[in-house]
Amino acid sequence: MPSGSRRPAPFSLSVQYATVQPGVPSRSQFRRWVGRALQRPAAIVIRVTDEPEARALNQRFRGKDYAPNVLTFPYPEFKPLRGDIVLCAPVVAREAREAGKPVLAHYAHLTVHGVLHLQGHDHEDEAEAAKMERLESQIMRALGYADPYGSQAPNHKPETAHGEMDGRSR
């Protein structure tokens, strides 16, 4: 994605707050982050949850018994692009605190990460991971945040950090 003054893709965004947690971003913050990462028209739902809900979703759709920081559910059969991004507020806050970074920066990164997954980016092999991380770093810098994969960033561990779902498998 070229940096500079690209025109954002049109999109609709619904934000659902299903938990009470300090430091959760506003709808306008989510909108800014989605707009920067999105490269084509889309309809996106972001749901901010607590740990029990995130754990239940992860168990149901991925067979994993823990609350991940982010789950992404793309629905590739729809045009324009549609998808859901689930962010677990307590996990996001804990990870930000442990990494010594601002919670909003971590939310921004995970939102960008989820939006890239919705558009088909992945990190299943090293080449895909490197490409996706470059995009995330570029977008985060354009948003005014530090590179999430810089020396101060936590290690990217997809098997423990977050999950993705192919909407067709639901």
Image (cartoon, helix red, strand yellow):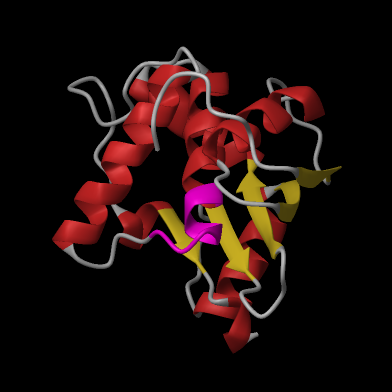
Left or right? Give the position of 42 relative to 4.
right
Quarter of the image where one finds residue 42: bottom right
Is 5 on the left or on the right of 50, as rendered?
left
- Residue beneath the point at 72% across and 22% down: 22
Q: How many marks?
A: 0
Pick the residue in front: 18 or 104: 104
**The quadrant where residue 48 appears:** top right
Q: Going by the picture, which residue comes out furthest to the bottom?
A: 169
Q: Please provide percent x and percent y for residue 41.
A: 69, 52
The residue positioned 51% from the left and 39% from the top of the image is 112
Horizontal side of residue 66 vs 53, given as left or right: left
Of residues 101 and 46, the one nearer the viewer is: 46
Q: Is residue 60 visible?
A: yes
Q: Is residue 157 above or below residue 133?
A: below
Q: Position of residue 97 (x, y in %)?
A: 45, 22
Quarter of the image containing the C terminus?
bottom right
Quadrant containing the N terminus is: top left
Residue at image coords 54%, 76%: 166
Left/right placement of residue 91 relative to residue 97 reads right
With respect to residue 159, does 169 lie above or below? below
Residue 24 seen: no
Residue 138 drawn in magenta: no
- The image quarter containing residue 77 is bottom right
Which residue does the image show at 53% across and 28% down from the upper left? 6
Residue 59 x %, y %: 57, 75
- How far from the left and from the top, in percent, is residue 119? 52, 59
In the image, which residues are magenta?
Answer: 115-121
59 to 148, vertically: above or below: below
Vertical side of 55 occupied by 101: above or below: above
Pick the front one: 64 or 157: 157
